[in-house]
Amino acid sequence: MIPSCEAFDFLILPGLTNSGVDHWQSHWSMAFPNASRVLQDDWDTPQLADWLARLDQAVAQGKRPAVLIAHSLGVALAVHWLTSRAPGRVKGAFLVAPSDVGSPEYTPDAVRNFAPLPRKSLPVPTITVASSNDPFVTLERARALASDWHSAFHDAGELGHINGASRLGLWPQGLVLLGRLLNRV
């Protein structure tokens, strides 16, 4: 069991196009009554300022300490938010499959306004999880980003973009890693 998970609000930050029903984030949103997805008005042509405003609202509405649970473009959102605001009740961030938003080779033009990614230490404990065969970021780049953020890093092996296509269900390995993060907040 994840230590003290009921003591936190889990704010789910999906990436581009949202997370479908087979995505581990969707499974976690259903499994944890204290999890809520931060909904965006435009999932297909995202604007960083709009997404930041939605995250501001979600953080302001909660009462318990919060942990950001981010995937892909949601990682870029989390990192921009953490480096531009006082973390307040946000006590940690679980960062999965970060998108290389500045790379035309790996990332669609629609997310270019999320570039550049902040490359400085994050103010809360974090874990960055990446796959060795992610089509949107190399393992080396993900590891370098984690190092810049002073984030613990975990190589999850060959899981693609660690999304619905990876068929992870509740993603037990991810739950173990989340538990490690919660032990640090």
Image (spheres, grey):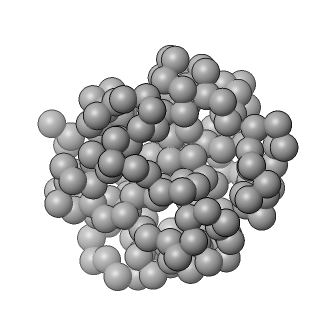
Identify the residue at horizontal 56%, vertical 38% (top origin).
97
Q: Residue at x 58, y 55 (%)?
A: 16
Please tell me in which quadrant of the rendered image residue 79 appears: bottom right
- The one nearer the camera, 52 or 40, is 40
Task: State the image coordinates of residue 93 (x, y, percent, origin top left).
Answer: 46, 52
**Residue 74 in view (yes/no):** no
Is 183 positioned to the left or the right of 126 in the image?
A: left
Q: Quadrant of residue 36?
A: bottom left
| Residue 180 position within the rendered picture, expressed as x and y whole percent measured from the top left | 34, 36
Q: Residue at x 61, y 62 (%)?
A: 44
**Residue 154: x, y in percent?**
50, 27
Q: Quadrant of the N terminus?
A: top left
Relative horizontal placement of residue 75, taking residue 64 as reference (left or right): right
Task: Report whether 148 appears left or right of 176.
Answer: right
Inspect this view and state whether residue 52 appears: yes
- Point out the residue furthest to the right here: 104
